[in-house]
Amino acid sequence: MADTPKVAVLMGSESDLPVLEAAVKELECFGVPFELRVMSAHRTPQAVAQFAQAAEGRGLQVIIAAAGGAAHLAGVLASMTTLPVIGVPVPTDRMGGMDSLLSVVQMPGGVPVACMGLGSSGARNAAVLAVQILAASDSNLRDALREHKAEMVRSVEEQDARAGEWLRDRGK
Ligand code: RP5
């Protein structure tokens, strides 16, 4: 039987999936059990309310919610659960995503949403932040996060070496 999901990854529409893939990949890398759902604050508000009210009882510990435009999914979820909610603003072709960003970030006092940056890097960071929240009570995840940082250091060092090689190849 599959592990009980600890993280829920929600999107307002299937059209958000290309952005959320970065979150899915990162959660898979950390081996965190998660579920992936489509629900909309505007098109299926009852489903969102039912989800938010049942989430904690189902063993979920963190909710990631991505939406674009009038991006209210994360905020509406946060209004109905005490679980931490991480919002991912999805870029739009209307206002370059500024509409999504402001919809997610401008929450009223007392109802926080941890708003990530726009797009895929925001989705990836949402997953890493979810892992960091879970890691507060999971030493294996803390070790995995340390390795994650070490891997980024190795990657940038390799890029640095390639930059030097590129310059040398130009005879500099
Ligand atoms: C939002 O509206 C969704 O999160 C999506 O980003 C945007 C457009 O949805 P579709 O019209 O592509 O279904 O609710």
Image (cartoon, rainbow, N blue to C red):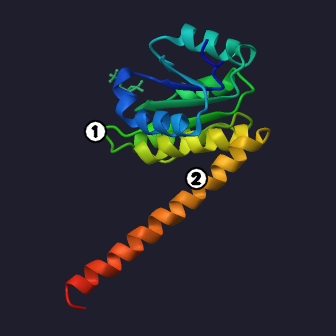
Looking at this view, name the residue that lies furthest to the front: 1
Q: What quarter of the picture does the C terminus occupy? A: bottom left
The foreground one among 57 and 49 is 57
The foreground one among 32 and 120 is 32
Disc on res. 58:
none
Q: What is the secondary structure assignment of the residue under circle 1?
A: loop
User: Is 34 placed left or right of 159 in the picture?
Assistant: right
Q: Earlier in the sequence, mark 2 or mark 1?
A: 1
Specify the amino acid type for callout 1.
Answer: Asp
Mark 2 touches mark 1? (CB < 8 Å): no
Specify the amino acid type for callout 2.
Answer: His
Q: Give the image location of residue 46, x and y in percent.
A: 56, 8
Q: What is the secondary structure assignment of the residue under circle 2?
A: helix
Q: Using the rendered image of the protein, determine whether residue 126 is visible from the camera's viewpoint.
A: yes
Q: Residues within 10 Å of mark 2 (few under 14, many from 20)?
A: some
Residue ID for mark 1: 93
* Residue in the picture at 44% in, 13% down: 43
The foreground one among 23 and 90 is 23
Looking at this view, name the residue that lies furthest to the bottom: 172
* Residue in the picture at 39% in, 76% down: 161
Whether 143 is drawn above or below 155: the answer is: above
Q: Give the image location of residue 121, x and y in percent.
A: 45, 48
The foreground one among 16 and 162 is 162
Whether 39 is drawn above or below 65: the answer is: above
Label 2 and label 1: CA atoms lie apart by 33 Å
* Residue in the picture at 28% in, 38% down: 93
User: Is 121 placed left or right of 5 in the picture?
Assistant: left
Residue ID for mark 2: 148
